[in-house]
Image (cartoon, grey):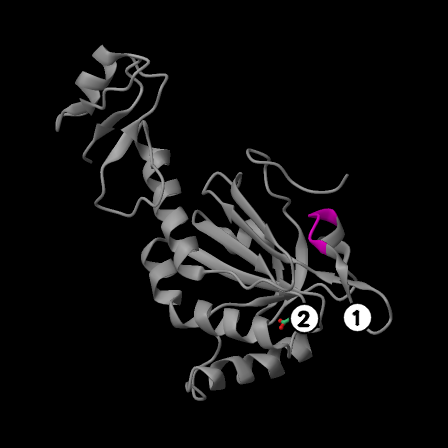
C-alpha cells in the first residue's frame, strides 16, 4: 500500500512547480516543511484554503516552516488559479507566497497515498484528498493529516500542531488537549520523578486521580 508513515524519511521526489523544477530535500534545505495537497484548482473550498494559507504564510515563516501545495493540475493552471486565490484575499498585486506542485500524472499522489477514491473528475479519475505532511529538518515525517475533498482544513490548527511538534522535538514534554503556546505542558510518561525534577526548573505538579497513579504531571516551559 503506498503512503508514508511517521518517522519515515520523506521521499526526495523531483517535481515541476510554480517556481520551476525542484528536488524536495533541496527545496526544504535545513527547514521544517509543510506539504498540503488539494483536490483541484479553480474549486471553491480549495480556494478558501489556499487563500487562508497565503494570509498566514508569515506565521509559517516565523516558525521556519517552508510551505508547498500540490494538486493534480498543471503548472499553467496553478499559476492562473494562484491569481484567483490572491484576489480572494484582495491582494491582486501579490504573488502566492508559496509554490504549488503540478502532479498532473498523479505519480506523487499515488506514491504518497493522497488520492481520494470518492472524488472523481469528469473522466472518472480520482482527485487528490486534502493531505497535510509536516516534515522535520531531518527530512522525516513528523505529522500527517488526511481529510476528504469535501472538508476544508483549519490552518490555525496546523500552526498549533507545528508549535507542539517543534516544542516536543526540543523538550521531553507532550502537549495536552487544545494546548496552545504558553499553556502548561505534560511531562512524558517515560521520565522518572527524579529526572523530571532535574529537567524542569519551574517544578512539576501532579494531579491526583483515583488510581493513585502519578501520570498526570504538568510543568510550565
Ligand atoms: C472544493 O474545493 O470545493 C471541492 C473540490 C473537490 C470536491 C469537493 C469540493
Residue that appears at 59% across and 37% down: 9
Q: Quadrant of ligand 1?
A: bottom right
Label number found at residue 70: none
Label number found at residue 121: 1
Q: Which residue is label 2 attached to?
A: 40
Residue that appears at 18% across and 23% down: 204
Instruction: Provide the residue span drawn in magenta.
Output: 111-115
In the displayed structure, does residue 127 sit left or right of residue 90? Answer: right
Quarter holding residue 193: top left
Looking at the rendering, in which quadrant would you find the C terminus? top left
Secondary structure beneath dot 1 equals loop
Looking at the magenta stretch, what is its main secondary structure?
loop
Q: Earlier in the sequence, mark 2 or mark 1?
A: 2
Looking at the rendering, in which quadrant would you find the N terminus? top right
Q: Is 63 colored magenta in this rendering?
A: no
How many marks on residues? 2
Residue that appears at 69% across and 60% down: 128
Is the residue indicated by label 1 positioned so its CB lies within 8 Å of ligand 1? no
Is the residue indicated by label 2 positioned so its CB lies within 8 Å of ligand 1? yes
Q: Distance of mark 2 from mark 1, alpha carbons?
A: 9 Å
In the displayed structure, does residue 1 sit left or right of residue 123? Answer: left
Is the C-beta separation of discs 2 and 1 under 8 Å? yes
Residue that appears at 65% across and 40% down: 4
Outermost front residue: 210
Amino acid at each position: 500500500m503506498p503512503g508514508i508513515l511517521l518517522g519515515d524519511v520523506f521521499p526526495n521526489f523531483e517535481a515541476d512547480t510554480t517556481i520551476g523544477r525542484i528536488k524536495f530535500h533541496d527545496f526544504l534545505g535545513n527547514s521544517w516543511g509543510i506539504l498540503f495537497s488539494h483536490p483541484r484548482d479553480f474549486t471553491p473550498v480549495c480556494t478558501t484554503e489556499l487563500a487562508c494559507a497565503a494570509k498566514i504564510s508569515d506565521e509559517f515563516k516565523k516558525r521556519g516552516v517552508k510551505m508547498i501545495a500540490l494538486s493534480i493540475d498543471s503548472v499553467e493552471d496553478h499559476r492562473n488559479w494562484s491569481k484567483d486565490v490572491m484576489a480572494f484575499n484582495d491582494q491582486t498585486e501579490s504573488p502566492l507566497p508559496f509554490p504549488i506542485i503540478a502532479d498532473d500524472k498523479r505519480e506523487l499522489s499515488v506514491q504518497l497515498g493522497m488520492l481520494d477514491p470518492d472524488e472523481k473528475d469528469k473522466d472518472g479519475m480520482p482527485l487528490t484528498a486534502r493531505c497535510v505532511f509536516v516534515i522535520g529538518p531531518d527530512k522525516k515525517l513528523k505529522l500527517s493529516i488526511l481529510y476528504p475533498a469535501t472538508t476544508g482544513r483549519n490552518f490555525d490548527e496546523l500552526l498549533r500542531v507545528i508549535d507542539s511538534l517543534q516544542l516536543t522535538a526540543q523538550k521531553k514534554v507532550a502537549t495536552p488537549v487544545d494546548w496552545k503556546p504558553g499553556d502548561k505542558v505534560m511531562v512524558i510518561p517515560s521520565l522518572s520523578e527524579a529526572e523530571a525534577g532535574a529537567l524542569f526548573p519551574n517544578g512539576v505538579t501532579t494531579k491526583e486521580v483515583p488510581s493513585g497513579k502519578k501520570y498526570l504531571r504538568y510543568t510550565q516551559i
